[in-house]
Amino acid sequence: MISTLLVANRGEIARRVFRTCRAAGIRTVAVHADPDADAPHTREADLAVRLPGATPAETYLRGDLIVRAALAAGADAVHPGYGFLSENAGFARAVLDAGLVWVGPPPEAIEAMASKTRAKELLGIAPLTRVTAADLPVLVKAAAGGGGRGMRVVRRVEELDGALAAARAEAASAFGDGEVFVEPYVEGGRHVEVQILADGHGTVWTLGTRDCSLQRRHQKVIEEAPAPGLRAELVDEISAFAERAARAVSYVGAGTVEFLLDGDTAHFLEMNTRLQVEHPVTEAVFGVDLVALQLRIAEGAALESAPPPARGHAVEARLYAEDPARDWAPQTGTLHRLAVPEGVRLDSGYDDGDTVGVHYDPMLAKVIAHAPTRAEALRTLAGALERATIHGPVTNRDLLVRSLRHDAFTSGRLDTGFYDRHLTALTAPDPDPYAPLAAALADAHGRSRFGGWRNLGSGPQTKRYAVDGEEHEVHYRHTREGLTADGVRVIHADAALVVLEVDGVRRRFAVARYGDRVQVNATALTALPRFPDPVAPLAPGSLVAPMPGTVVRVAEGLAPGVEVKAGEPLLWLEAMKMEHRVTAPVTGTLTALEVAPGRQVAVGTLLAVVRPG
């Protein structure tokens, strides 16, 4: 029996495993990099061991340090979580060689399937080795790992070399393995997967399907189970393939077999030899705890002959600290408050007051709803996200709500190109027109209505706020009857709550203030000074960092005096485990290059200047 378990991961992943361990009476051990010294997963574990350093390569990707940490803490088992070393056969062997229980598949199974190229060879599927114009578009993909890192779509042959170099660099940084391969890219396909669970006694479960088609940059955003609208015969076909793949490598533990559907044709993508981020939707539909079953299997227990019957529908949304309207730019800062209504599941790596930093993935939480039907599950999740309290960095919350209510999604017309087609409409600004007034009235709470006794009421007060980059000016007045505003009846106003009556309809506004940032329900505002400080303007053509990160590459031959074309990539920033291209804003001459590879930059740092012409 396992008594003490180390989770070789961080954030939401570690906390998810800890939750099951607490219910089972198993002691928990966390490992943490220096930026995670006070992270929630570090705080809530029974024991915690420091991994000196900040980057994943220095810490969470160092299997030797993690094994040493497990032994130092007296752990008798290691759970890899998902991501980092979870699909690293060498790490699994090191755990076993140290006399510890490995909560995962045998190293040989990981080795056979963790490399997507070798997995396809094992199952008789040949990769694309020579790319011609007739093969386009193609997808460059990391052989190890997942989560969209190390992936590039190539639509022109001359772009292939650059895509290969970028994918190798990103894969090496994220997974410690820079191997990539090329495969055909299916336009408008659906990403569907089958959850498997196998014990050491020959039983293999296939626990239905999941649809993960809504993706940005090849990373999943919304997932659901079961995958809607599939023919029963196709479900049987991919389930049988998944079981065959598991048996081909004598698989033990939890895993996922992924497919890309081109109409009714299923193309095998990969087998993930680990638990997936989206596993909660399967847990909800089948009424199981997959982590608990992983632990039982690792202890040698046998599964029942068949899984429980599926019930209802579940959908999961990944809440990211990012701005979808600005090329999905990751965001940093303090997460002041995160809470969702009762009736949905929240898996989060953050607590109120935690800092969202630059070193790791920008996912704040997963929110999961389960209901008897798909329509009810979508409605429940959309409503919960809309009413959620999220104060802090910009998030993709509005995008998630709109996606869940979009006609194409609710009708089951979904594919991996969903955001390519609908992103502009889904990210169009739609701030509450009364949020600035509510913010101003809350700010005015407690102030004297009169500056000493007077017979005349005070003059109008003015406040300015920025919302989605636009400036809004509001006016209100203190009178003997209280606060008033043109066309709006003020029912109540204090520092935390404003109630307005507009055209006979009463509306409530919860208000919270953090410095010059004001949160009014789901609308974020920035209070603007009455007399703005003068700011030195940037030179025309200036490129500034859109996010905090590290400059990882500069275009070959780029230097002051070089001619560049509008849209041409000039340099690459790495932030939150993803590379982001910075391109020339205009065609012209590069007159300044202020950064070099390896330099860390803050938001707004001047990177380069391109003179038009």
Image (cartoon, rainbow, N blue to C red):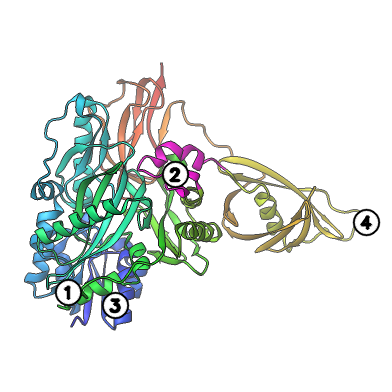
- The disc labelled 2 sits on which kind of residue? Pro
Identity of the residue drawn at 15% across and 75% down: 71
Q: Position of residue 539 (x, y in %)?
A: 46, 27
Say whether disc 4 or disc 1 marks the residue closer to the N-terminus.
1
Residue that mark 3 sits on: 21
Give the Cα distance between marks 3 and 2. Answer: 36 Å
- Which dot, 4 or 2, sits closer to the camera? 2
Disc 3 to disc 2: CB gap under 8 Å? no
Look at the image and give the residue range highlighted in magenta.
Answer: 406-429
Mark 1 element type: helix
Identity of the residue drawn at 38% across and 67% down: 311
Mark 3 element type: helix
Mark 2 element type: helix
Residue 207 seen in the figure: yes
Residue that mark 4 sits on: 455
Residue that mark 1 sits on: 298
Q: Is residue 419 magenta?
A: yes
